[in-house]
Image (tube, helix red, strand yellow):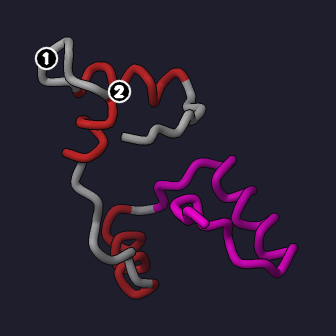
Amino acid sequence: MSTKTISVKLEAYERLRNARRRPTESFSDVILRAAWPEAPITGEELLEVYRTEGPFLSEAALDRIEEAKAAGLPPEDKWRTD
C-alpha cells in the first residue's frame, strides 16, 4: 500500500482524531468513511439558502472570493491528483 504525506490544520487533525471509531482506526479509514457530496451546490441553490438563512460566509471568505474574482482565474482544485 502506498502512502502520501499531507499537512492539515490542527483543527482538521483534531476532527479526524475525534472521528475515529476506535483508537487504532487510521485516519485513512476515517477519511474513506466520510460522505462527500456528489454534486456541488448550484448558484440557484446558494441564492435560496442566502434568502432563507441569510449570509453565512465570513469576512475572510468573502475577501478570498473577491481576490479570486479580481485575478480572473478559476479556483484551485484541491482534490486534483495529477
Quadrant in which residue 17 is drawn: top left
Earlier in the chain: of badge 2 and badge 1, it is: 2
Quadrant in which residue 52 is drawn: bottom left
Extent of the magenta region: 55-82
Report the residue marked by disc 2.
15
Q: Residues within 10 Å of mark 1 (few under 14, many from 20)?
A: few
Q: How many marks?
A: 2
Q: Are dots 2 and 1 in contact, CB under 8 Å? A: no
Would residue 78 appear left or right of 72 to someone viewing this image? left
Would residue 53 appear left or right of 3 to someone viewing this image? left
In the rendered image, residue 29, in percent from the top left (x then y), is placed at: 24, 36
**Front-most of 66 and 20?**
20
Quadrant in which residue 48 is drawn: bottom left
| Residue at horizontal 13 percent and vertical 23 percent from the top | 21
State the residue lying farthest toward the left.
Answer: 21
| Residue at horizontal 82 percent and vertical 81 percent from the top | 72
In the rendered image, residue 75, in percent from the top left (x then y), is placed at: 67, 70
Instruction: Name which residue type carries label 1.
Output: Arg
Q: Secondary structure at mark 2?
A: helix
| Residue at horizontal 57 percent and vertical 59 percent from the top | 78
Instruction: Name which residue type carries label 2.
Output: Arg
Mark sitting on residue 22: 1
**Residue 69 within the segment the image draws in magenta:** yes
Asked if residue 52 is positioned above or below residue 26 in the image, the reply reads: below
| Residue at horizontal 55 percent and vertical 32 percent from the top | 8
Q: Secondary structure at mark 1?
A: loop
Quarter the N terminus occupies: top left
**Residue 67 within the segment the image draws in magenta:** yes
State the residue lying farthest toward the right.
Answer: 71
Would residue 72 appear left or right of 75 to someone viewing this image? right
Quarter the C terminus occupies: bottom right
